[in-house]
Every structure is written in structure tokens, then in C-alpha cells.
């Protein structure tokens, strides 16, 4: 047997750092692994249990490794639009949007959430493993008049699951008024919280930005709610895989483009018409005509997981694509995967062969998500 | 009957020239939730150190090496339908395979239960 599973092979940050909830996790017997340069909890009682609990009640995830950035200054929105394909100028206060930082050739440098704060500033949440690169990229490309503040004095929690709202509203009355992809400022015992109704599991839930000095007390208060159990990065990964959500550095990288990644929804209508983002010519051509390859979901036959790096092969055994994420899906009860395949193989129902460690696995292309999203949208009954 | 342990966290229970092989409770705990086990077919010859089985948790695949040389007499068919036996009873019902020893002297280098416990304590 090798050492403990080497799951998360992200590049290290420039220096080894400790996040505010480090001791909190260890006190709960979390198994810690290095991720994005920090020791982070991969699991507490077990990935499977934490995954299933999140789908039926509420999982509390520490995602303080992620980069929280604040952009201020007149024209920050239009300046940011030069770097991504989302409509930021049209983003109303308290609304958030998923977007993609793009390289000059249209390749994806990172994916992120952009929120319009009251007063007009922008709040960005970027991937932990990419935040140093993103900060450098933003500093290089945004005008000097735009200030970028790395909010490294804030922790970030995600409370995810159908009962997240029941637990959180008990501590923070008013959060139930938020709907999917909206956010607002709240107060908990004198601590300012910025809460959005969003997440990375496909479930209803919230992401909560908390000043670092208060996060331990707030996490204690959340974990004391009967609906809530802490959940680690392992469950976060299996939940997002089932939800069909890509993971940067695995399903997305500088070689992938928004249309190939099946993220065409991130190309806002106004931006499709006006262009003016990196790689616009290529990306808009792909939006019109289709990309050469596509990110698809795969259902794997049998029980053996097929993981990142496995080859997609054609009938003649030639490699035509690559699995970028894969594993056993606890809520599906079967192995699932994401892969990039040629456009001709991307139609749901297409049967494919996968090759991993010399062994063939049959798979079929399926629509994503693998598990239906259960977001609480505006206008829907709650 | 005697039970031996390896530094790769396998146990091997020996009775006469037959032996049963599995992974230890420590290894199962490190792996987490086991979702798939690929055990060898009867009749396969394995040399000490060969990859004999694959065990997959939610997140990772790990090889299980033959702790001694031998001829496989049985893979644990129950693991196909219930891989979680590796978590619930790793040193019993969750066994991986049985083999007939071809080089019994290979057992001499393995740890007994007390030595393995001491070994795990150093990890």
C-alpha cells in the first residue's frame, strides 16, 4: 500500500501558510493534506458520509484557501471586462456572476465569481491554487487607478445542502431572503458577514466571508446546529463532480476555451455581441460553429472508478480524448467522469472506451449534472 | 496458524502451506471508503512484490502487492458486490485473496502483530 491517497496535487503557494481554522480542523480530527500551499482538511469522518450528509442536510466547508479580492476605483467593472467575457458593467449590487479569466488566445487562466458590492466595488473569489497568479495578472492588466485588495484577513466558509438555510437563518436572520446568485451584508453578534447564496455542490447553500478573527467562533456556532457537520475537500470534490462543475487545473486550464469547456453560459449576451475580451475572435467563432473538442460527462460501466489521466480511445484503440476528473459518485452509486472528446463524440448516448493502467472500460456520454441541481432561484417557491 | 504483517500494511494468515492476504485496519483507515477491489483470479502465479490486487477508495487507486510468492487459489468474490467489507472488517471478511505458498521462507522477514503495531506507531 502506498502512503495516504495523493489526491490533490496543486502547485504550492510561494510560502507555507496556516489558515485561521487550522486548529479547529485538527481539534475535530480532520485528516489534513497540503492543498494550494496550506494544510487543509480532506476529510473528518469520511468522504462518503460527508458527501451524503451534504446532499441530505448541510455540510460546512472551510474554503479559506481561496482568494478573496476586492477591486475598487471608477471603471473597475469595465476594466475587468477587458480580461473576461462576462457582463460586469451590468451586474447589479448584490448580484454575482460566474466568469473566466482568459489569456490572449482565449485559453482559461482561472474561473471565478464576481460580485457587485453595495457602493459599486467588485468582490472576486478565485481558486486558491491560482490566486497568486491571478493577483499578478490583474495587477499587470488593470489600470493603475483600480485598487486591488487581497482580503487575506478574511476566511471563507461554504455551508451547503438542503438544510443549510435552516441552520444559517437561526444564526443570521434574513439570509432566507437571498436567492441563488445574490448576496448581501449581514451581522452576527457584531461581526460583519458577506453572504452569497451560491456554492460548488449543486445544492442550495451559502458562501460566507468572515473576518479571520471571528471565524472560529462562527464556525463553532454553525457546527453546533443539528443540520450541520463539517465536510472536507474530498467531499467537496465528489459533490462538484456529480454537479457537473469543472475544477480548475483539472477540467479547465490554459489549453481549454469556454466553449470547449461547455461553459458557453459564461459568455454574457452583451459581450458576445460586442467582443472586447481576450481571445474574443476565436471564442466567438467557437460559440457559433462549435469547438473542436468538448467537455462531456461520462457514465462508466461496472464499479471501477476511471480517473483523471485515463485515455478516451476510439474503436481502433487510438487516443481521441482524455479524462480530466473521475471517481466514484456516492449519490449516483457508480463511477462517473468528465472528459474532453472530439465534437463528433460529444452527443449524449455516444459509447466510448476508456483506457486506464492497461485496462479498458466502457462508458457512455451523458448530460450533466449527474445529480440534479437544487438551487433556490428567484420566483421559485421556497 | 500464524499472522504476519508487512511494511506495505498487508496481513498474511498462514495455515500449513496456504495463506490468506488482506490489508490492515490501519491501511483501510488511511484509504477511506473503499468503492472497488480488483482481486486476482485463481491459478495466477505471483512473485513476492508483484502487483496482485487493486483497491480503490472514493478518491484514489492503490496497488496491493503480493507479500510472498505463491499460486492464487481464490480471490474474495464477496468484495465485488460489497467492497466496503474492506472498511468494516479489514482483517476478517474483507480479505483479498488466498494463495499456496511456493517460498515459505519468505515469511521469515515479516513482522508479527506486536512489531507491526510498533511500526505503525512510528508513522
Image (cartoon, grey):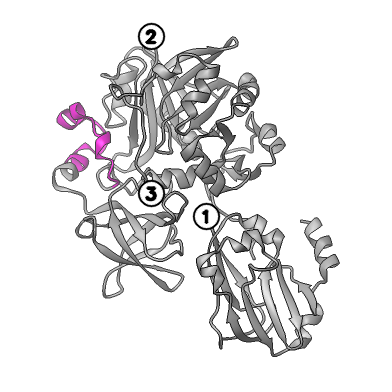
Disc 3: which chain?
Answer: A
Which residue is label 2 attached to? A119
Residue at the spot 66% in from the left edge and 36% down from the top edge: A25
Q: Closer to the camera: disc 3 or disc 1?
A: 1
Disc 2: which chain?
Answer: A
Residue at the spot 48% in from the left edge and 38% down from the top edge: A56
**Dot label at residue B58:** 1
Total number of numbered discs in the rendering: 3
The answer for how far apart the CA atoms under marks 3 and 1 are is 18 Å
- The stretch drawn in magenta includes residue A266: yes
Q: Secondary structure at mark 1?
A: loop
Q: Residues within 10 Å of mark 2 (few under 14, many from 20)?
A: few
Q: Quadrant of residue A34?
A: top right
> Relative to A36, is A84 above or below?
above
Which residue is label 3 attached to? A251
> Relative to B108, is B79 above or below?
above
Q: Residue A180 vs residue B40: left or right?
A: left
Q: Closer to the camera: disc 1 or disc 2?
A: 1
Q: Secondary structure at mark 3?
A: loop
Residue A124 versus residue A193: which sits nearer the camera? A193
Residue at the spot 61% in from the left edge and 79% down from the top edge: B50
**How far from the left and from the top, in percent, is residue A35?**
57, 43
| Viewport quadrant of the C terminus of chain A | top left
**How far from the left and from the top, in percent, is residue B5?**
76, 71
> Relative to B11, is A264 above or below?
above
Q: Residue A170 vs residue A204: left or right?
A: right
Q: Quadrant of residue B117?
A: bottom right
Q: Residue B113 vs residue B89: left or right?
A: right
Residue A156 versus residue A293: which sits nearer the camera? A156
Q: Who comes first in sequence, dot 3 or dot 2?
A: 2
Magenta segment range? A261-284
Amino acid at each position: 500500500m502506498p502512503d495516504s491517497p495523493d489526491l490533490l496535487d496543486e502547485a504550492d503557494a510561494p510560502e507555507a501558510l496556516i489558515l485561521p481554522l487550522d486548529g479547529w480542523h485538527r481539534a475535530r480530527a480532520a485528516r489534513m493534506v497540503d492543498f494550494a500551499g496550506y494544510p487543509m482538511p480532506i476529510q473528518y469522518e469520511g468522504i462518503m458520509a460527508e458527501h451524503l450528509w451534504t446532499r441530505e442536510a448541510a455540510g460546512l466547508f472551510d474554503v479559506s484557501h481561496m482568494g478573496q479580492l476586492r477591486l475598487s476605483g471608477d471603471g473597475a467593472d469595465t476594466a475587468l471586462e477587458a480580461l473576461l467575457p462576462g457582463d460586469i458593467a451590468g451586474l447589479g449590487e448584490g448580484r454575482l456572476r460566474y466568469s473566466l479569466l482568459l489569456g490572449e488566445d482565449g485559453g482559461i487562466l482561472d474561473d471565478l465569481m464576481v460580485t457587485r458590492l453595495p457602493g459599486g466595488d467588485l468582490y472576486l473569489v478565485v481558486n486558491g491554487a491560482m490566486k497568486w497568479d491571478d493577483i499578478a495578472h490583474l495587477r499587470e492588466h488593470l489600470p493603475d487607478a483600480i485598487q486591488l485588495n487581497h482580503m487575506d484577513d478574511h476566511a471563507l466558509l461554504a455551508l451547503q445542502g438542503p438544510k443549510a438555510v435552516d441552520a444559517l437563518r437561526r444564526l443570521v436572520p434574513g439570509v432566507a431572503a437571498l436567492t441563488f446568485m445574490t448576496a448581501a451584508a449581514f451581522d452576527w453578534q457584531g461581526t460583519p458577514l458577506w453572504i452569497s447564496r451560491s456554492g460548488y455542490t449543486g445544492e442550495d447553500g451559502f458562501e460566507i466571508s468572515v473576518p479571520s478573527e471571528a471565524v472560529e467562533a462562527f464556525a463553532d456556532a454553525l457546527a453546533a446546529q443539528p443540520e450541520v457537520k463539517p465536510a472536507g475537500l474530498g467531499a467537496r470534490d465528489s459533490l462538484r463532480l456529480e454537479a457537473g462543475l469543472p475544477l480548475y487545473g483539472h477540467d479547465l486550464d490554459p489549453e481549454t476555451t469556454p466553449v470547449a469547456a461547455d461553459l458557453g453560459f459564461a459568455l454574457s449576451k452583451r459581450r458576445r455581441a460586442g467582443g472586447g475580451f481576450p481571445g474574443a475572435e476565436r471564442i466567438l467563432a467557437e460559440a457559433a460553429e462549435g469547438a473542436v473538442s468538448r467537455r462531456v460527462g461520462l457514465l462508466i460501466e461496472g464499479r471501477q472508478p476511471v480517473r483523471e489521466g485515463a485515455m478516451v480511445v476510439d474503436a481502433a484503440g487510438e487516443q481521441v480524448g482524455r479524462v480530466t476528473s473521475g471517481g466514484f459518485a456516492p449519490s449516483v452509486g457508480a463511477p462517473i467522469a468528465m472528459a474532453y472528446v472530439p465534437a463528433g463524440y460529444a452527443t449524449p448516448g455516444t459509447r466510448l472506451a476508456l483506457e486506464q493502467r492497461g485496462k479498458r472500460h466502457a462508458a457512455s456520454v451523458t448530460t450533466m449534472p449527474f445529480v440534479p441541481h437544487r438551487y433556490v432561484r428567484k420566483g421559485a417557491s421556497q | 496458524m500464524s499472522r504476519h504483517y508487512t511494511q506495505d500494511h498487508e496481513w498474511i494468515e498462514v495455515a500449513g502451506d496456504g495463506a490468506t492476504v488482506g490489508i490492515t485496519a490501519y491501511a483501510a483507515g488511511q484509504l477511506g471508503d473503499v468503492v472497488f477491489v480488483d482481486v486476482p483470479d485463481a491459478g495466477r502465479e505471483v512473485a513476492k512484490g508483484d502487483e496482485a490486487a487493486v483497491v480503490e477508495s472514493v478518491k484514489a487507486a492503490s496497488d496491493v502487492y503480493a507479500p510472498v510468492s505463491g499460486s492464487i487459489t481464490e480471490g474474495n468474490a464477496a468484495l465485488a458486490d460489497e467492497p466496503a467489507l474492506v472498511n468494516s472488517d479489514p482483517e476478517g471478511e474483507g480479505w483479498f485473496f488466498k494463495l499456496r505458498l511456493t517460498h515459505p521462507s519468505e515469511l521469515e522477514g515479516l513482522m508479527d502483530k506486536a512489531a507491526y503495531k510498533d511500526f505503525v506507531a512510528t508513522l
